[in-house]
Image (spheres, grey):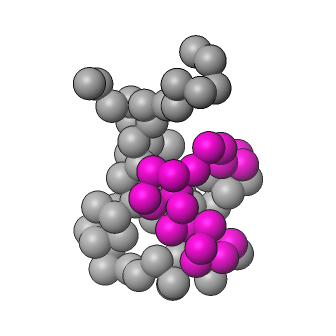
Amino acid sequence: MPPEEGHQVQVHLDRLLAERGMTLSELAVRVGVTVVNLSVLKNDRAKAIRFSTLTAICRELNCGPGDLLSIRED
């Protein structure tokens, strides 16, 4: 897929945070990234994510990558 076409990865951070009663700010502190970076991810504007960040998010939300990310079927 050429870069200009974008991606179809959907991020389910809002749902996971709500299910766990956690705020984006709290997760940012626990993971060690900025709220702005998590907001970019949450709003499907991220172009990439480091495996270390993905691992930390999954650890703090007690989930797997497949719970956090899926492929949007248009």
Q: Position of residue 39 (x, y in %)?
A: 51, 68
Q: Which residue is drawn at 53% across and 76% down?
A: 27
Asked which quadrant contains residue 48, the reply is top right
Query: Which corner quadrant holds the N terminus?
Result: top right
| Frontmost residue, 45 versus 62 | 45
Is 72 drawn above or below residue 37 in the view shown? above
| Frontmost residue, 9 versus 60 | 9
Residue 47 falls within the magenta-colored stretch? yes
Is 30 drawn above or below residue 51 in the view shown? below
| Residue 35 appears in the picture as rendered | yes
Q: Position of residue 18 (x, y in %)?
A: 28, 72
Residue 39 falls within the magenta-colored stretch? yes
Residue found at the very far top of the displayed protein: 1
Residue range (magenta): 33-51
Q: Where is residue 41 in the image (x, y as percent from the top left)?
A: 52, 57
Q: Where is residue 71 in the image (x, y as percent from the top left)?
A: 38, 30
| Frontmost residue, 54 versus 3 | 3
Query: Which corner quadrant holds the C terminus?
Result: top left
